[in-house]
Amino acid sequence: MQSVSPAISSKSRLDGMSVNSDVVVDGRTKQFLKEAVDKVVNSFAKHSHGRYGRVNVVEALQDFWQMKARGNELRNAALVIYESVPGTNPPYVCYVTLPGGSCFGSFQNCPTKAEARRSAAKIALMNSVFNEHPSRKITDDFIEKAVAEARDSFQKSRQQQNQVDEQQQDDNDPDDPNTGIGAFRFMLECNRGRTMLEFQELMTVFQLLHWNGSLKAMRERQCSRQEVVAHYSHRALDDDMRSQMALDWVAREHEAPAGGVVAVELALAERELETARLAGRELRFPKEKKDILLLAHAQICPQ
């Protein structure tokens, strides 16, 4: 499952504007992101109202998903959920979760909570509109290109680590569903016809399973990748799954001689989420990590 994100990120326009989690988003990148977002919002306003002008992005985002919900079986219908981060002083931060599960956050320094909400709605609207482009549909051509990119990324990673041997070459066979690349192809083929945002929730589940160590545990129990993919492809990311992952981290905390495992991982997750938010990236994976670790921390330190 490690080879999934390079292929997906290569298809994302926003990833070209983003940075790695260990660097600061510079002013030039922020300005480029703001201009790109404003351009899409203004274009949406023109096509929605017949003219350029100021658009209420919060209402526009809701209208967009209500239009999509008509005649479609969208989970949670057209429910767009906002979550403001508690704070008494600016800059304020807000997250917005779309009906399919994708999450975005305010990417600007916002002096008010209302402005943070608008900032989050802007980046979510941009991604929602862009997601309708044909290039975001999972087609046969898309699958072939994504798998090829994932395989190249896998091979380069192995070469950098000087870990290339015959067995590892077999591990990235795209035609074998029991290899990482093969499982990636299987997942894409099962979602043929969907968009990348629709595919994102499934990918988040497997990213979390990998991060949490669950995939490794399943392999040790001789579960094939195809069996795991088939099972979790129909499993929603819900409170039960989050609670189970939190319990796994509580167990790691108790097993560590000096403790502090959850605190260290939580600090890393918070930095990753903050950098991704300021870069305008999709946030579901880092935000879910933070929320799961907060659940674990609450059980370790209930006060």
Image: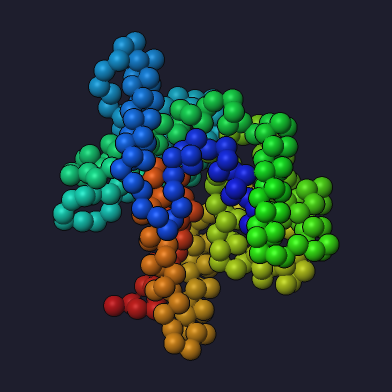
| Colour setting | rainbow
Above or below for 5 versus 228 = above
Q: Is residue 63 left or right of residue 7?
A: left
Above or below for 99 versus 206 = above
| Corner quadrant of residue 41 | top left
State whether residue 187 appears in this view: no
Q: Residue furthest top?
A: 50
Q: Residue at x 52, y 85 (%)?
A: 255
Q: Residue furthest bottom?
A: 257
For the N terminus, which image quadrant? bottom right
Above or below for 244 versus 3 = below
For the C terminus, which image quadrant? bottom left
Q: Residue at x 54, y 47 (%)?
A: 201
Q: Residue at x 42, y 65 (%)?
A: 268
Looking at the image, which is closer to me, 51 or 35? 35
Q: Residue at x 36, y 53 (%)?
A: 24
